[in-house]
Image (tube, rainbow, N blue to C red):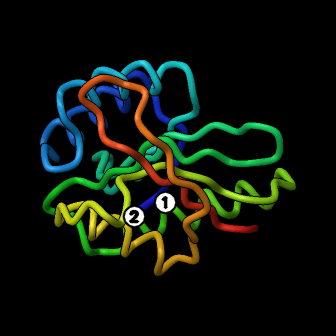
Amino acid sequence: MRIIKATKTDRQEAIKIATDLKEWFDKKGLQYMQIDFQLNNLVVAKDKGEVIGFLCYSSDCGRMLLIWLGVKRNMQRNGIGQKLLNWLVCESKKLGLYSIELETLPDEDDYEPYCQTRAFYYKNGFKRILYKKTRIKDWDDQIVLEKKI
């Protein structure tokens, strides 16, 4: 497996992966994801030429912002998300950034797919630093998780 900068075709494959992960990415989320994939950085995990995972990121004032992360359904729990996250940690260190931040559903939301998501990030050293009330109609509140680099 290798992690590379996404091509236009890779972006389309990453959207297909996300579309299949309906528990995490709804229709509105997928619309925003397509925009984010164009405006921000996107890398993909590839195995034998097939896109099996993706990570969209940006930076802001010394912080790396993890925007989207997903792994093909039949490839989950095989360390691919871990490798993508480790890649982002290495990139953050190379750039001299001080933390990685992301937003996700709060711990108070017991929706199982996001319990798994939070457990993954907590296991990888992320800590909750902020609770954000939603400003977008029909969206949920969010928490900000941070990993110091």
Residue closest to the eye, 133 or 76: 133
Tell whether label 1 touches label 2 (CB within 8 Å): yes
Quadrant of the rendering where the N terminus is positioned: bottom left
Residue that appears at 26% across and 74% down: 77
The residue that disc 2 covers is 81
Q: Quadrant of residue 68?
A: top left
Which residue type does callout 2 highlight?
Gly
Disc 1 residue crowd, few under 14, some 14–19, many 20+, Cα 10 Å: many
Q: Residue at x 75, y 67 (%)?
A: 149
> What is the secondary structure assignment of the residue under circle 2?
helix
Q: Nearer the viewer, residue 130 or 22?
A: 130
Taking the image as shown, residue 44 lies to the left or right of residue 99, namely left
Which residue appears at 79% of the width and 61% of the height? 93
Rendered position, 12 above or below 116: above
* Position of residue 33 measured from the top left corner of the image (x, y, whole percent): 37, 28
Instruction: Name the residue type under label 1.
Output: Leu
The CA span between labels 2 and 1 is 5 Å
